[in-house]
Amino acid sequence: MDSNDSASLSARRKRTRDQVVAILADHGNGLTRASLSRMTGLSASAISDCVSFLRASGLVVESSAPGKASGRGRRATVISLVSDEGVVVGIDFGHSHVSAAAATTAGEVLHRCAAAIDVDHRPGPAMDLAAELARECLQRSGHTLDDVLGIAAGIPGPLDIRTQVVRPPTILADWVGLAPAAELERRLGHPVSIGNDADMGARGEQAYGAARGLEDFLYIKASHGIGAGIIVGGRPYRGATGIAGEIGHTQIPGAGNWCRCGSRGCLETVVSVTTVRRQLAHVLATHEDSLDDSAVPPLAELSDNPAAARVLSEAGRTVGRVLAGLVNCLNPSALVLGGELGAGNEPFAAGIRESVARYAQPASAQAAEVRTGRLGAEAEVRGAIAAAIAATRIQLTGTN
Ligand SMILES: [Zn+2]
């Protein structure tokens, strides 16, 4: 074998190891060799080679899976990442808040903190605040930046994965041209992995929440905007340039209001936490008492109010029509709902269920279970933690 062949073989092995480690980081409970083979498309012997290397490097362990005895009474084994010393930091930028959390490399949150800020229009101060919150979480959990193995952050806008720069045109206009990874790295002195907030939410629910064990599902972040995190074959699907899942800008028949993206009649102009709260303020007002939308209680508390439940399920039906198209296209096993509008909101979920059953192809609709997320407002920051853990492991998989 000449040196070119051996260099390409070694690059291929490294890619395989990174892929396996990233998948294991997204499945906290470990996976069998057969699952790894199915999810990577690699042969059993390639997986076996890879696992041997990772075990010898001390990155993974193999242990018997509780309750998973195989046919002849032999216990199935699962491969999982070794937890080690040090901490990771996850950061979540919403449209009007920033939150950060310090966690162990096993994904256990040590401290979380959040603060309100106009993230959309004040990117610089939002970056400063994120760095300050990251430091505060570390300090309160007895750590410093020196103990940090990895940092990841989710941003509420379109990031071009080729350039790591926020894309034009007008969504998140004040962020266009900004390189969030470089900005955070400058403030924290560590490399930072960046992803879209809905992708982070999907990773969070997949690693620690309602999508554990699922390989094909959509996470819907329904909040000030509406975005989808798409997981296909166990891995996030980001599209050619990293901006897949912008379902909030799908045109709704009959809607005509201008959207922040420059089009008319986008889903977000009809359904968002802002429009729904405005409708609820109208519905919940009494004769003596006109209500402004800041007085509307948290949406998850309104499920038992029949009038409010109608508003919420109507919003769900509208979002569900758009999701029905995605269900036809991708045949997911679940739609996991998050964001301020989606988390813990049963009437909204019921509306989505209704539209998916009505408008998606029957066999695909039947396969797609609509469920609310388990992590609520923490899904995105927990996903950033999972991404930080994955990035840390990949640095360790070596080059030989
Ligand atoms: Zn739009």
Image: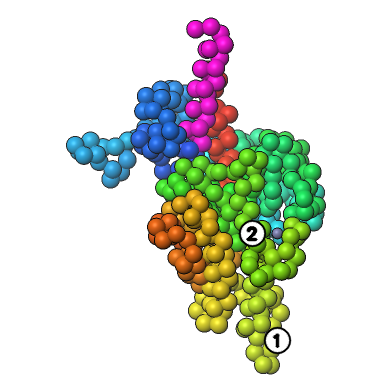
Q: Taking 165 as reference, is 314 above or below it? A: below
Indicate yes or no whether the magenta region holds residue 328: no
- Which of 98/278 is in front? 278
For badge 2, the amino acid type reads Thr
For badge 1, the amino acid type reads Ser
Image point 78% across, 44% down: which residue? Answer: 178
- How far apart marks 2 and 1 lie (CA) works out to 33 Å
Percent from the top left, x then y, of residue 172? Answer: 75, 54
Residue 260 visible in this rendered orientation of the protein = yes
- Chief secondary structure of the magenta span? helix
Residue 290 got which mark? 1
Q: Quadrant of ligand 1?
A: bottom right
- Which of 232/128 is in front? 232
Asked whether mark 1 lies closer than 8 Å to ligand 1, one says: no
- Horizontally, residue 76 falls left or right of residue 216, namely left
Percent from the top left, x then y, of residue 8? Answer: 55, 17
Percent from the top left, x then y, of residue 326? Answer: 53, 55
- Asked which quadrant contains residue 339, the reply is bottom right
Image point 80% across, 52% down: which residue? Answer: 174
Q: Which residues are magenta?
A: 1-22
Does dot 2 land on a helix, a strand or a loop?
A: loop
- Horizontally, residue 64 falls left or right of residue 183, namely left
Residue 250 got which mark? 2
